[in-house]
Image (tube, grey):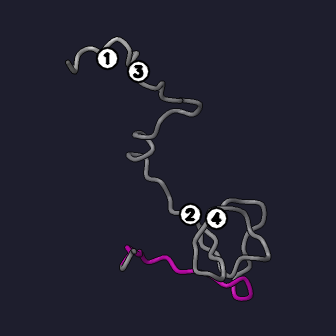
Amino acid sequence: MVKSYVAGQSTWRLPAEEPPPLGVKMLLLNRGGVCVIGTWGVWALAWAPLPLIPEHIKAELLPAGYARRPEPVEDWKLHAGDAA
């Protein structure tokens, strides 16, 4: 069970106080207190903008469309007799 969390200076915004932008990705807080990423929906209680990604962190991201290839797995039958 998580007993604490890290929070910055950003706060949740209620749609009655600050209408959320429509059709864009943002942080959404549901009535159960769970944060999800998505576009505004009537089920959401509050919203917050996504954090900015600084250029030095963007440089560390994988390129779009990149998928790591899984490491090859050796046939277990080749080593079945090694345990003896």
Q: Is residue 67 above or below residue 4?
A: above
On screen, residue 65 versus residue 4, left or right, reads right
Proximity of marks 4 and 3: CB atoms separated by less than 8 Å: no
- Residue that protrudes farthest toward the front in the picture: 84
The span shown in magenta is 4-17
Name the N-terminal-most of marks 3 and 2.
Answer: 2
Percent position (x, y) of residue 6? 37, 73
Pointer 4 or 1: first along the chain:
4
According to the picture, the residue beneath numbered tag 3 turns out to be 73
- Residue 70 left/right relative to 82: right
Proximity of marks 3 and 2: CB atoms separated by less than 8 Å: no
Quote the CA–CA distance across marks 4 and 2: 5 Å
Residue 74 shows in this picture: no
Secondary structure mostly seen in magenta is loop
Amino acid under disc 1: Ala
Residue at left offset 52%, top offset 80%: 11
Residue 19 image point, x, y percent: 74, 79
User: Where does residue 80 sit, x and y in percent of width and height?
Assistant: 31, 17
Three-letter code for the amino acid on which mark 2 is drawn: Leu
Q: Which mark is residue 80?
A: 1
Crowding at dot 2, Cα within 10 Å, few <14 / some 14-19 / many 20+, comes out as few
**Can you name the residue that lies furthest to the bottom here?**
17
Q: Earlier in the sequence, mark 2 or mark 1?
A: 2
Q: Is residue 68 above or below residue 31?
A: above
Residue 50: image tag? 2
Q: CA distance from mark 4 to mark 3?
A: 39 Å
Report, in whole angstroms, how far the alpha carbon at label 3 lies from the one at label 1: 14 Å
Residue at which label 4 appears: 26
Magenta stretch containing residue 73, yes or no?
no
Of labels 3 and 1, earlier in sequence is 3
Asked if labels 2 and 4 touch by Cβ distance under 8 angstroms, the answer is yes
